């Protein structure tokens, strides 16, 4: 197997990777589940990393997924935009900006809430943002990651993806990206699609340094950027 090209860009999931939105999303999904006579405990595991309409299809296939998506969007809007950043997210994005590393958002969520939530969290927005409505097939299909790489003008196998959910990690790996699994929501054993795992954004930055994406102790200047395999 030939080596992949050196890493050149970073693709980032939003919820759980940059925004600590779990509590807000849990309230939304619990409300929706109870409204529809469903068990919130059974619905919640179906939500992580997936588009809302895909979760509806999995949890309640008899319902109109498009109509329920609108209902879920209304519930999310009622939550407001005050969602805190994941610890270390601001430092990671600042490091990418300082090193002039191309980066993009790849999220199963809708585009409406992202700008205001990032502004409230004090996080910058990149030029390239791929949302759930931008693709026909959501995560775990590779479409969203393939689209983000194409919009950046970087081959998927030269991109590093950071994901915290199994569906997202599977999507990124299927697209050909090198995947860092952030283990803040799931343990490493639940993220087998990830090439490596990180328990915090400090460890994510170290992994990006080791791959040559960011400067730092993980990069050997004599050897240059690392190539990615697998």
Image (tube, rainbow, N blue to C red):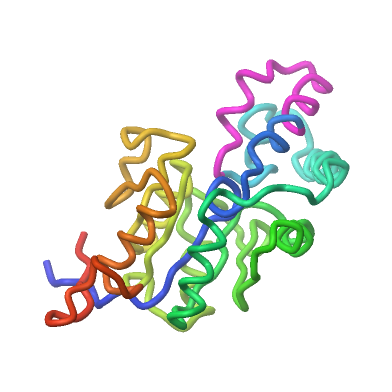
Q: Position of residue 187 (x, y in %)?
A: 38, 33
Residue 177 quadrant: bottom left
> Where does the C terminus fall, quadrant-wise?
bottom left
Q: Which of 221 and 62 lies nearest the eye of the viewer?
A: 221
Q: Give the range drawn in magenta.
A: 28-49
Q: Where is residue 138 in the image (x, y as percent from the top left)?
A: 57, 52
Left or right, 218 with respect to 148, comes to left
> Where does the N terminus fall, quadrant-wise?
bottom left
Residue 36 quadrant: top right
**Main secondary structure along the magenta-highlighted residues:** helix
Asked if residue 41 lies in the magenta stretch, the reply is yes
Q: Where is residue 32 in the image (x, y as percent from the top left)?
A: 79, 28
Q: Position of residue 189 (x, y in %)?
A: 31, 33
Q: In this view, does 9 lie above or below 35?
A: below
Residue plotted at (60% across, 48% down): 15
Asked if residue 2 lies in the magenta stretch, the reply is no
Q: Is residue 100 above or below residue 13?
A: below
Q: Which of 221 and 197 lies nearest the eye of the viewer?
A: 221
Residue plotted at (65% across, 27% down): 59
Residue plotted at (51% across, 54% down): 88
């Amino acid at each position: 197997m030939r080596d992949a090209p050196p890493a050149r860009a970073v693709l980032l999931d939003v919820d759980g990777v940059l925004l600590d939105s779990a509590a807000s999303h849990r309230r939304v999904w619990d409300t929706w589940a109870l409204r529809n006579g469903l068990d919130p405990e059974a619905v919640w595991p179906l939500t992580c990393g997936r588009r809302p309409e895909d979760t509806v299809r999995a949890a309640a296939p008899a319902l109109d997924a498009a109509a329920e998506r609108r209902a879920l969007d209304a519930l999310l809007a009622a939550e407001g935009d005050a969602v805190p950043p994941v610890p270390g997210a601001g430092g990671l994005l600042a490091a990418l900006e300082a090193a002039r590393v191309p980066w993009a958002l790849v999220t199963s969520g809708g585009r409406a809430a992202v700008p205001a939530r990032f502004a409230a969290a004090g996080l910058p927005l990149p030029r390239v943002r791929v949302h759930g409505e931008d693709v026909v097939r959501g995560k775990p299909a590779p479409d969203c990651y393939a689209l983000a790489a194409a919009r950046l003008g970087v081959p998927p196998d030269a991109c590093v993806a950071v994901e915290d959910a199994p569906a997202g990690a599977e999507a990124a790996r299927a697209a050909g990206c090198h995947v860092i699994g952030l283990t803040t929501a799931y343990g490493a054993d639940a993220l087998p699609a990830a090439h490596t795992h990180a328990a915090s954004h400090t460890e994510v930055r170290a992994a990006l340094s080791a791959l040559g994406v960011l400067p730092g102790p993980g990069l050997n200047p004599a050897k240059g950027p690392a190539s990615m395999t697998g």
